[in-house]
Image (cartoon, coloured by chain):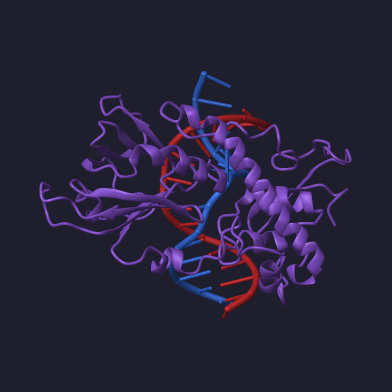
Chain colours: A purple, B red, C blue
Amino acid sequence: MPELPEVETTLRGVRPHIEGRRITDVVVRRRNLRWPVPPEIDALPGSRIATVSRRAKYLLLTIAPGTSASTGPPRQGTVIIHLGMSGSLRIIAPDAPHRPHDHLFLTLDSGLQLRFHDPRRFGCWLWTAAAPEEHPLLRNIGPEPLSIDFDGAALAAAARGRKRPIKDLLLDGRVVAGVGNIYACEALHLAGIHPKRAAGRLSAARLDRLAEQIRQVLGHAIERGGTTLRDFLREDGAPGYFKQELHVYDREHQPCRRCETSIRRIVTGQRSTFYCPGCQH
DNA sequence: CAACGGACCTGCCTGC
DNA sequence: TGCAGGCAGGTCCGTT
């Protein structure tokens, strides 16, 4: 499920329930996620979740040392969570029955529990004691698409001299953080750019337009994701904005909503790519 | 360096 | 109905 809007929706849904809370119990039911869950995660009880934030599609829980009442040595650092392809977080009562693929539980002093669910186990829970932005997974990540650091000029700098298809460039986290397959397709359609076009051959004006459409489509999806936040205690974090509003993604052989041309599916960078031959060049 | 293919997993859908 | 094959919203890592 998770593209950046779902991760942001998850962040907003979970944050009010866990920020500032002390962790009272941790259960790792399955340690072999994308990488093994490190022992520092098991040692979290007694510590406090000071802040919850997002960088690209990573969720970051900064952990403050435990109080004198806690057991074990006080520790300070950051839990790095990624939802992979199929991961989700939800807040639930600790005595609620667990489902298959519920891999990791954090019980909080509020009496509620944060549960990580991930059938494909491409997600991860990692620990770093250093500044999270220095972690190898985060160190080389490009600007947040919704920050002021991301614009057509940033895209142009990354595209200069590159022959890669522009679609592949958008999925490269070093260029821009957290743009996934769906929104890369959608933004290219909105900007009227063919996904296979060599990145370095796009004009500054077209890259400006593309950057703006990336911001628009992600911002819009986050707004829509927000509509399910109310029910976050019950929902598993999958927002319902999907499908209906997509212009090209997963719409092969269906008519373009703008020009009626049949949507085409191709593969680039080993990923399915959908576009309208009528309005993308 | 850039670019590419393979890897990690389960579930769901299609077609034979 | 069963089963094989293809495909899926991510992204890291090793090899050219």
Q: Nearer the viewer, residue A104 or B13?
A: A104
Residue A211 visible here: yes
| Image position, residue A275 (x, y; %) | 77, 48
Q: For this view, does A231 lie left or right of residue A271?
A: left
Rendered-image quadrant of the C terminus of chain A: bottom right
| Image position, residue A85 (x, y; %) | 50, 45
Which residue sits at x=61%, y=59%?
Answer: A171
Q: For this view, does A150 lie left or right of residue A100?
A: right
Q: Quadrant of residue A24?
A: top left
Q: Nearer the viewer, residue A186 or A271?
A: A186
Q: For this view, does A237 lie left or right of residue A166?
A: left
Query: How many circles with numbers are drawn on the protein?
Result: 0
Which residue sits at x=11%, y=53%?
Answer: A72
Which residue sits at x=31%, y=67%?
Answer: A130
Q: Nearer the viewer, residue A198 or A9?
A: A9
| Image position, residue B16 (x, y; %) | 66, 32
Q: For this view, does A69 lie left or right of residue A128?
A: left
Which residue sits at x=80%, y=71%?
Answer: A201
Q: Is residue A13 above or below residue C11?
A: above
Q: Nearer the viewer, residue A147 or A87?
A: A147
Q: Quadrant of residue A133?
A: bottom left
